[in-house]
Amino acid sequence: MQVPTHRLTDALGRVHQAAPDARIVSLVPSITELLCELGLAAKLVGRTGFCIHPRDIVAEIPKVGGTKSVNIDKIRKLAPTHLVVNIDENEKPTVDELAEFVPNIVVTHPLAPRDNLGLARLMGGIFGAEEAAERWCAAFESKYAALRASKLGPARTVLYCIWKDPWMSVSADTYIGAMLAELGWKLPRLAQDDTRYPRFAWSDELVAGLDAVLLSTEPYRFTEEHVDALERQIGIPVFLVDGEMMSWYGSRALAGLRYLRELRGMVDGTKQSLP
């Protein structure tokens, strides 16, 4: 199956050639999982320590550091032909250094749930898994249609927290913001709303404009103890949410669409039957 060239254009507009014999280093945990989902695990020669899914498969793939603290020498020794990176998760100076000896840098930047379709087709098209990618896209379209067909609850303003000390949130132009928008929910405008991951301070004015607060299990490991403490502090509903379901594009996006419906039911105080 020959893949049209326009299908192999990455987030920076670079056109890639099909490379079924590629040696891949992935610095993006969610895309490492997607590559495995597409049957491409054998082509992965390196991954970050945060690439933890699917656990039994990635255990056999060498680690090359973190998403930002990358071991350049280790990657050089692995002699990859392709490096998969993400604009939000990886540092540009590091990627530029790796580009000096890795021939092909595939840059990704999905910002909304439906961007997963292009992402899957890009990975499948470059690395020789077009049919698997199309099957995955069909499954995604089915889950997305089910979400869109389900009854919307009331519009809500929610604050999605990803860190504390300092407290940090997300802006509407992030993948998480787009996921929340699928429910008809919006994020509050914060003092530093010109950044995609703004810091904020709790205030009566901020809390008064919120229907609920969502504490994510990643990157900060919020727990139910944090939920209880914050709820006592601010006096409005606070919920613990699965950060992987809300922020991991690629394979986890399928479960993420279902999770959105569960989250809506949790916040609205209702239960929905799921397919």
Image (cartoon, rainbow, N blue to C red):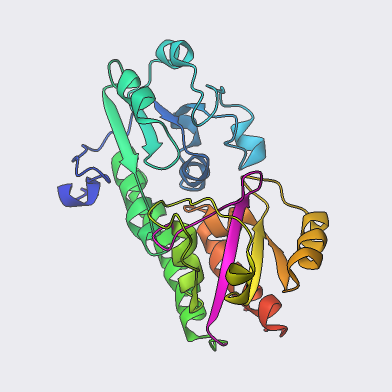
Choose between 56 and 272: the one closer to the eye: 272
> In the rendered view of the protein, which quadrant contains the C terminus?
bottom right
Q: Quadrant of residue 242?
A: bottom right
Q: Quadrant of residue 173?
A: bottom left
**Count of marks overlaid on the render:** 0
- Residue drawn at 48 percent across, 13 percent down: 74
- Residue drawn at 16 percent across, 47 percent down: 5
Does 130 sit left or right of 262 as displayed? Answer: left
Q: Position of residue 67 (x, y in %)?
A: 50, 32
Question: From where the camera sits, is residue 252 visible?
Answer: no
| 169 in the magenta segment | yes
Choose between 17 and 260: the one closer to the eye: 260
Q: Is residue 188 above or below residue 28?
A: below
Q: Is residue 109 above or below residue 173?
A: above
Q: Position of residue 20 (x, y in %)?
A: 32, 34
- Residue drawn at 45 percent across, 59 percent down: 171
Q: Position of residue 124 (x, y in %)?
A: 35, 47
| 167 in the magenta segment | yes
Q: Position of residue 201 (x, y in %)?
A: 60, 55
- Residue drawn at 46 percent across, 72 percent down: 181
Question: From where the camera sits, is residue 165 visible?
Answer: yes
Choose between 141 and 218: the one closer to the eye: 218
Q: Which residues are magenta?
A: 154-174
